[in-house]
Image (spheres, rainbow, N blue to C red):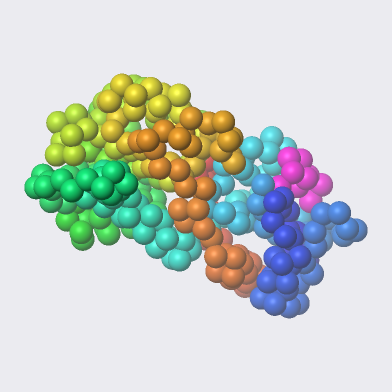
Amino acid sequence: MSLLLAMTGWHVEDWRRRFQALLPDMPIVVPGEPFDRRAVHYVASWKHAPGSLTGLPNLAAIFSLGAGVDFIFADDKLPPAPIARIVDPDLTTRMSEYVVLHCLIYLRQQRRYDRQQRETLWADDRDQPAARAVRVGIMGLGELGQDAARKLSVIGFDVAGWSRSPKAIEGLITFSGEDGLKAFLARTDILVSLLPLTPETRGIIDAGLIAGLAQDGRLGGPFLINAGRGGSQVEADILAALDAGTLKGATLDVFETEPLPPDSTLWSHPAVTVTPHNAAMSEPEAVATAVAAQIRRLEAGEPLQNVVDPARGY
């Protein structure tokens, strides 16, 4: 049996060396070279070419090499093998660092002080709300969302979460579904999106959602942080809300088109912070180690962990 590395945009030989060191008795094969498709039991995928996983009659599992799996479901010829996502403590910690950083930037009004520094303006400003007076709402309550919520709560933020289906999480106010979305948005000063990309979440951050955010908070209006998926946001609506003042600022790590085109208004908008989809970069050694551990579990007759529900898309 063998492991097929099906990836684009990454240096496949680096990944082959990693996996060969972790699985020394298993052949590691790559597209573009001859291999026995009947021997492939496992696939490690990163944006594989659509249709390239057909004709693998003994495929037992597909492993995503990234935090999301939407790129796997983009293959309309995907074979019916179980799909496992990466749950990596290092990646989770990095995402929480990003979320906490940008919530604190908005809380402490750092962008305004940056402007004042450039203008050599010393302003005696005593309007500094405490974290407990600022309401953060997290959309997406998987591993990433729950960890970010815990760390924001430790700092003192008033944190709530929203998910498509109900979740009871100790110490966290939660809302769910369409019925809970309106109340969730109405008590949110900083909206953090960590949603996976599914048909239900595509374009969810639109004019209507933004209009539902709280306008009566201590920050003078709502802010948006999206470190989930670019397909969940409607960038024209975000820009319109910023220009209208119904949204005070946006930190975007993900975009409808990536890389972000040079002519996008988001680059130069004074209320937008752009980061290049690096809020939580997967550490290659940690990812390869996690996948190898899953393969060893299967080889030992143990169940696959972190299995994706195809009906939900995550």
- Compared to residue 270, the image places residue 92 above or below, namely below
Q: Residue 135 placed where, x, y %?
A: 19, 43
Q: Foreground residue, 175 or 299?
A: 175
Q: Residue 158 placed where, x, y %?
A: 17, 48
Name the outermost residue toward the left: 126
Q: Residue 182 placed where, x, y %?
A: 25, 28
Q: Which residues are magenta?
A: 48-57
Identified at 15% across, 45% down, the residue is: 123
The quarter in which the N terminus is drawn is: bottom right
Q: Is residue 83 visible?
A: yes
Q: Foreground residue, 288 or 213?
A: 213
Secondary structure of the magenta portion, mostly? loop
Q: Foreground residue, 33 or 269?
A: 269
Identified at 21% across, 60% down, the residue is: 154
Identified at 63% across, 44% down, the residue is: 72
Q: Quadrant of residue 62?
A: bottom right
Residue 93 is inside the magenta segment: no
Residue 56 is inside the magenta segment: yes
Query: Viewed as shown, does residue 285 lie left or right of 99?
Result: right
Identified at 29% across, 37% down, the residue is: 223
